[in-house]
Each structure stands twice: as C-alpha cells, then as structure tokens.
Amino acid sequence: MKIGIIIDVEPGIHGGVASAVKSLLAALGRLEGPERYVLIINSQSQAHWLSPLAANQEFALRSARKENIVKRGLRRVKREAIKLAGLAKASGWPEVPLSDGFIESLGLDVVHFTTQGFTLCATPSVYNPHDLQHIHYPQFFTLQQLAWRDVIYRAACRLSNAVIVNSQWIKEDVIAQFALPPDRVQVIPEAAPTHFMPAVADADRAKTLERYGLSGKFALYPNNTWPHKNHQRLLEALAWLRDTKGIRVPLVCTGARHEASWPRLEARVKDLGLADQVKFLGFVSEMDLRALYQAARCVVVASLFEANSLPIFEAWAEGTPVASSNVTALPEQVGDAGLLFDPNDPASIGEAVARIFSDDALCADLIEKGKRRLADFDWGRTAQAYRAVYRKASGRPLGADDRAVLAQDWMRNPLR
C-alpha cells in the first residue's frame, strides 16, 4: 500500500501543527508493515527539516508540470462532486483547487492532507481540519480568510473518504457544522513532540538560560502569537497579580510573532508596564525549547480554542505543572492533571498561576498527575490509528488490531 502525505508546513511558521506533522511522520516510520509513505513536499528546505527518513518513506517534490488530460477529466469530476455535496459556487467565491495530475501520477492508494489545505483529486483522501476556529471566532480572520476556510473546509470534509480530528469536542463540532455522518470522522489524539527531540544535558540547559537572561522562577507560554492564543488576557492577568496581590510572575513566551497582531500585543506590554517582566523569545530551537520547559515553574496555556494542546503534552513530558484554559477540548485533555481557568477572566488566570507559584505541594501533585496522564498518549498508538484510517479509506479490509485502535478514544477513556 502506497500512502501520500501532503507536507504544507515548516517549523517557525506553522506552530504546533508543524511539530505534530513531524512527530506523526517519525512514528509512521517506526511501524512494521507493507505500507510505504511518499512525503509530498514543496521545497528542499522541507526535505532538510524532515530528514533523515525511515526505510519505508521517500520524498516527492511537487512538480509544476500540468497533466492536461487528467485535469480535464478531473474538472468534470469536480463539478459533479461539488454539486452532489451541495457546495454551490458564488461569483468571486474561492474555488476548491483541482489536481493538476501530480498526485495521481505517484500511483498512491490514498493521500493524506495533514493541514487545512485540500485539493480535489482522483485518489482517495484523508483530511485533517484540525478545528473550526473561524466559525466560533470570525473576528480573528479577514473576510478573504473566512471565505477560503468556509469553501475549503466544507468541501474537504464532505468529499474526503475520512476526516481525522484530535478530540471528541472537535468531532462533534465538525459533524454539527458540516452534517457529516459520525463514522466518517475519526478521533485520534496526539502526544508529546518532545519524544522525538534531542535530550538536554544540564550544561546545555544552563547555556540556554544564560543566553536568554533567565534566572529564578518563570511561567512559560510556548505558542505563536495568533489572536486565539490569548496572550493579551495572560498579560492582563500578570498585571492583575502585580497590582492587586503584589505578586510578580515573570513570563517567557516562545513561538513566531503573528505579524497582524504583534504590534497590538507589543503595545499592550508597554501599556501594562510589563516590559521588565515579560520576554518574547520568538521561535527557538528544539533543544532550547526542552530546556525552557524543564526550567519553568509552570506552563500556562491561555488559548481560547484548541483541538488539543501540544504544549500541555510537552509540559507533562518534562515534568512541568500545567495551568490551562477550561474551553473547547482542553478540559477533555487535561483531566485532573492541571489547574483550569477561565481564559476570558484575567483574575481567574492570575489565581491559577499564583497557586502554582506559591504552593510546592500542589506543584509536586500536578507533576505526578501529569506523568500519569501523559502515559495515556503515545505516538506509536497514534500512528497505528492513522495507518488504520489509511487502510480503511483506500478500501482495504481492517484486521482486528486496526478495528481495536479505531474503536478506542484514549483521550476520554484512557487505556489503563
């Protein structure tokens, strides 16, 4: 069986999605079986990022060559498929991209679109919508972005042979928004990308802290500064703690700076008088990231919308206590292994952070619970579930192991 995997992400730009894609590829490469994986890339930089590959994997650099005969045939398929899916085309509205024949030329049994992009092709497809944030928070998107997401997500979810999401909360949302049959949408939780990152020695950790001028206790928020990551409310929580409780909590943020929202966030830091208390380090190396996790007093995830949070998995893997938003799929993921807060209330965020900073016994308890919760997730099991979906989408019969891994939602019902 030959499986194509579309790689549309790069580190430093696409945040946790890039880490998740790389981790999935690493886990698929460790599986035994007859499957071969073709990683469809756009650039040599992606090849460098993902190398070395496993024995069952190879690269295919996307070609600009047009396959006109295939394209004409697929255009007819597209018109009929969109008509059947109820996806009417309006004047000036974004269109679902049509394959130029490159995907079909690879002789694939199934193709996996790992990010929100989608191309209609003759090969059976698997699609990851990740989440439908744009429906719940349209104010974070331009009209053009909203139009694109409405067309592409809806078409991809309805026309793909299988849709994969990370949590039951997102599954229910996708079903409700796009009227999909529940058996088309498969929940497959992720795990900690740090499993595949280099180990950090004590000397390396000390160098990282010295390079960034860090000492003492600090809170860590490792996320790109997209609006839904809610950095602004977290900043307001720090100011609230300082002004009402006399508690000063240093904050370290990693991740790319979102160009559209960064100026407002930078101005908010100044307005709140937090310039000497908050550091935005930008994108950091994998080794530096692990070092920061290990040195942090806690990891704070203030996000307004998540399918699941990779920083939470990573914090548990490094033995760091977690404080998290209580919205969307996050309570489902965290369970009892973190403090939950209302991300729209700076006082709620501040109270959770203050508890972790002041209570050593609480920290020890959260670290232990985090280790236990992390054991519920494993990239090997995640890769097995993805492989089972690939087999099912391509029309192959499933074995007992495949059926068992797809029947188990270990996000909500841990295998203990």
Image (spheres, rainbow, N blue to C red):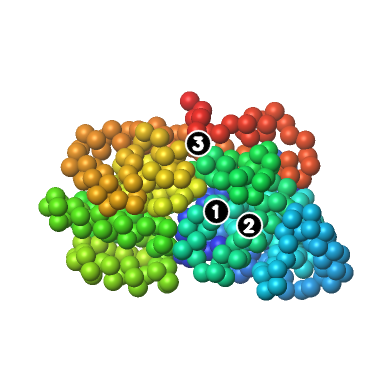
Residue beneath disc 3:
411
Disc 2 residue crowd, few under 14, some 14–19, many 20+, Cα 10 Å: many
Q: Position of residue 138 (x, y in %)?
A: 50, 61
Instruction: Say which mark, if any, is on residue 153.
Output: 2
Q: Position of residue 183 (x, y in %)?
A: 68, 38
Question: Which mark sits nearer the N-terminus, 3 or 2?
Answer: 2
Disc 1 residue crowd, few under 14, some 14–19, many 20+, Cα 10 Å: some
What is the secondary structure assignment of the residue under circle 1?
Answer: loop
Q: Position of residue 51 (x, y in %)?
A: 57, 59
Which residue occupies 30% across, 70% down? 266
| Horizontal arrangement in the rendering, residue 109 relative to residue 143 (left or right) | right
What is the secondary structure assignment of the residue under circle 3?
Answer: loop
Q: Which amino acid lies under the numbered mark 2 shown in the image of this protein?
A: Tyr
For this orientation, the residue located farthest to the top is 416
Instruction: Say which mark, if any, is on residue 109.
Output: none
Which residue occupies 40% across, 49% down? 311
Q: Which amino acid lies under the numbered mark 1 shown in the image of this protein?
A: Leu
Residue beneath disc 1:
132
- Whole-number angstrom distance, CA of label 3 to CA of label 2: 24 Å
- Report which quarter residue 285 is drawn in: bottom left
Which residue occupies 73% across, 47% down? 161
Q: Is residue 58 visible?
A: no
Disc 3 residue crowd, few under 14, some 14–19, many 20+, Cα 10 Å: many
What is the secondary structure assignment of the residue under circle 2?
Answer: helix
| Horizontal arrangement in the rendering, residue 17 relative to residue 264 (left or right) | right
Observer-nearest residue: 192 or 183?
A: 183
- Whole-number angstrom distance, CA of label 1 to CA of label 2: 8 Å
